[in-house]
Image: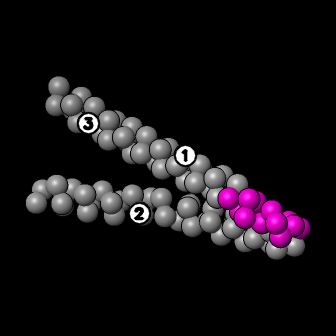
Amino acid sequence: IINFFYFVFFSQEKVKRDFLPALKGNYTLWPAAQLINFTLVPQNLAVLYVSCVAVVWNTWLCYMNAKSDEEANAAKLAAASNSVAKKD
């Protein structure tokens, strides 16, 4: 039960922290990519083009996720070290 509450609490924090940047990136990349796809890319290369854009998109999402996790861990470490320093 404790693990469940831990998961729910940190999942909500992660969504609050990461959702809007990911959504903004989504609304920036995909409309432009599809506009290029439908207007400039030959039909026989459309799937290849969108697949390449999807690789870039997934790489960016993974980078943002790792960056966010590092920042959250650094903040937790700083808070823990501050609490230990205050006790001394």
Q: Earlier in the sequence, mark 2 or mark 1?
A: 2
Q: Residue 78 location, x and y as percent?
A: 34, 36
Q: Which residue is mark 2?
A: 15
Question: Can you name the residue that lies furthest to the left here?
Answer: 1
Q: Please name whichever residue, 50 or 5, is drawn nearer the observer in this view of the structure.
A: 50
Helix, strand or loop for the magenta stretch, by majority: helix
Stretch in magenta: 40-51
Q: Which residue is mark 3?
A: 80
Question: Can you name the residue that lies furthest to the top here?
Answer: 88
Quadrant in which the C terminus appears: top left
Q: Nearer the viewer, mark 2 or mark 3?
A: 2
Residue type at mark 3? Ala
Residue type at mark 2? Val
Q: Is residue 45 magenta?
A: yes
Q: Secondary structure at mark 2?
A: helix
Q: Is residue 64 above or below residue 74?
A: below
Q: Which residue is mark 1?
A: 63
Mark 3: few/some/many CA within 10 Å (<14, 14-19, 20+): few
3D distance between C-alphas at marks 1 and 3? 26 Å
